[in-house]
Amino acid sequence: MSETLADAATSNDLIAEVARLRAEIERLEDRVRTLDQLAHEDPLMELPNRRGFMRELRLLVSSARPPGEQAALLFIDIDGLKRINDTYGHKAGDDALVHVARLLTDGVRKSDCVARLGGDEFGILLRQSSEAIAGETAARLRSKVSECEFICDGNSLRLGLAVGLTMIAVGDTPEQVISRADRAMYEQKSAA
C-alpha cells in the first residue's frame, strides 16, 4: 500500500513539475517576443526601426516574385525638423516625428512597410508597385505632409519631405537598394 502512495506522490510531483516547466517556458517565450519587438521597433512610435526595416527589406529582396511584379523603396527625409528641435525643443521634434509617421502610415497600403530609420529619416517598402505608382505615392505623401499643418505651442508649422525612390531589382542586396534610394533622396534635396 505504501508503494502505491509513494508512486502517487511521485506522479503528482512530476505532474506539478511539468506544469511549472510549461509555465516557465511560456514566460520565457513571451520575454523573447518582447525583446524581439524592442530590438525591431522604434521606441517613439509603433513602427519598425532600422533593424526591423532591414529584416523586411531582406525578406522582400530574397523572396521570389512572380514575373512582372515589382517593388519599390521610398527613402524619406523630413525637412524642417531641425528648426522645430532648435526652436521648440526635442519634445516638439518628437511630436512632429509622430505626426509625420501617422501621415505616412495613413498614406500607404496596409501591405506596405513604413519604418523610422533613425533621426528624421523614414523608409517605405511598397510591395507590388510599379515605378509610376511608386512615383505617385511619393508625390502624394509629399503633398500630404506639406499641406497638413503641425501645431506646436499654438504655432502652425509646416514640414516637408524629400523622397528618394528606387525600384527593387532581382539580384539586389538590401544595401544596394538603400544606397540608391538615399542618393535619389539627396539628389531631390539638392534640386530643391
Image (spheres, rainbow, N blue to C red):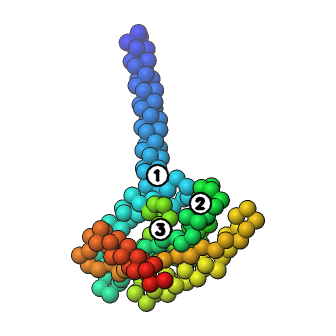
Would residue 66 be found to the left or right of residue 108 on screen? left
Real-space CA distance between mark 2 and mark 1, rounded to the nearest whole angstrom:
28 Å
Residue marked by disc 3: 122
Residue marked by disc 2: 85
Dot placed on the residue nearer the N-terminal end, 2 or 3: 2
From this viewpoint, which residue is outermost toward the bottom? 132
**Is residue 63 visible from the viewing direction of this image?**
no
Dot placed on the residue nearer the N-terminal end, 2 or 1: 1
**Residue at point 46%, 52% (across, down):** 37
The amino acid pointed to by label 2 is Asn
Foreground of the two, 64 or 122: 122
The amino acid pointed to by label 1 is Gln
The amino acid pointed to by label 3 is Phe
Query: Which image quadrant is residue 44 in?
Result: bottom right
| Disc 2 element | helix
Q: How crowded is mark 2: few (under 14 residues within 10 Å), some or many (20 or more)?
A: some
**Residue at point 59%, 66% (across, down):** 83
**Residue at point 61%, 64% (across, down):** 84
Residue marked by disc 1: 37
* Mark 2 or 3, closer to the camera: 2
Real-space CA distance between mark 2 and mark 3, rounded to the nearest whole angstrom:
18 Å
* Mark 2 or 1, closer to the camera: 2
Q: Give coordinates of residue 27: x percent, y percent.
A: 47, 38
**Residue at point 30%, 68% (across, down):** 175
Query: Which image quadrant is residue 6 in?
Result: top left
Q: Give coordinates of residue 171: x percent, y percent.
A: 23, 76
Q: Give coordinates of residue 23: x percent, y percent.
A: 47, 35
Disc number placed over residue 121 in the picture, else none? none
| Disc 3 element | strand
Q: In which quarter of the image is the N terminus?
A: top left
Q: Residues within 10 Å of mark 3 (few under 14, many from 20)?
A: many
